[in-house]
Image (tube, rainbow, N blue to C red):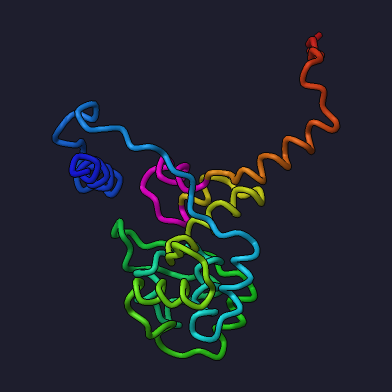
Amino acid sequence: HVLSDCRCFFRWCEETGLIDRAPIPRKFLPRIQERPPERLSDDEISKVVALREPYGFICRYLLSTGLRWGELARLSTSDVQGGVLVIHQTKSGKVRRVPLPEDIRAELKNRVGKLIRLKHACSVSQYFRKVTGIEGFHVHALRHTFAVRWIEDGGSLAALQMILGHSTVVTTQRYAKLSDDFVQRESERLGGRVNFCSPRRENNAT
């Protein structure tokens, strides 16, 4: 477990630019079993966005922007410029610009100052689990959900990398894993009109 934690720590240091390479070989550290993104189902999304304020607003905002909790906790309405959210204090230290959907911009019209007054993600996650009954819920799952749905709706991986603020696209790829249900639907959609067993016709250039 200690070596696994070291592997995660060194990987984060590389991705954020704190170090060029890990001080010990990657092969020395144990392999970590890949886990799918902890995304919310459609029913779970309906539950969390309908919660009383400010919890419902927090969910709608994070699901629409993919922000980290720490980034949201530091933001104020002055950080919204022309429908774009400008994030100055980021994990990588680089300024990031995130487009805001129209419905979120409408909610911000009546707000002044800090977007939220809550500080601790753990207590917020605990409240969500208690009220909604979603086991293992944590606010970072909203970021995962945003990333997965972005890809499923046809958004590009490059744009998602910029929105999430990842230094490398490798990190973005780990977040943006398609759900099993989506892959199954795509397989059924293509299988209904494409015969994968028949040879493809090649267009011969003349």
Q: Position of residue 194 (x, y in %)?
A: 82, 27
Q: Is residue 69 above or below residue 187?
A: below
Residue 20 position within the rendered picture, expressed as x and y whole percent measured from the top left: 21, 38
Q: Nearer the viewer, residue 9 or 166?
A: 9
Q: In the rendering, at what x and y percent does residue 78 appear?
A: 43, 82
The residue drawn where x is 84% and y is 33% is 192
- 74 or 206: nearer the viewer: 74
Identify the image quadrant of the N terminus: top left
Residue at 73% across, 35% down: 187
Q: Which residues are magenta?
A: 162-176
Q: Nearer the viewer, residue 106 or 44?
A: 44
In the picture shown, does residue 1 fall above or below 56? above
Q: How many marks?
A: 0
Residue occupying image coordinates x 60% and y 73%: 47
Residue 82 locus on image (x, y percent): 54, 75
Point out the residue furthest to the left here. 23
Taking the image as shown, residue 51 lies to the left or right of residue 10, namely right
Instruction: Indicate left or right for 200 with 34 as reference.
Output: right
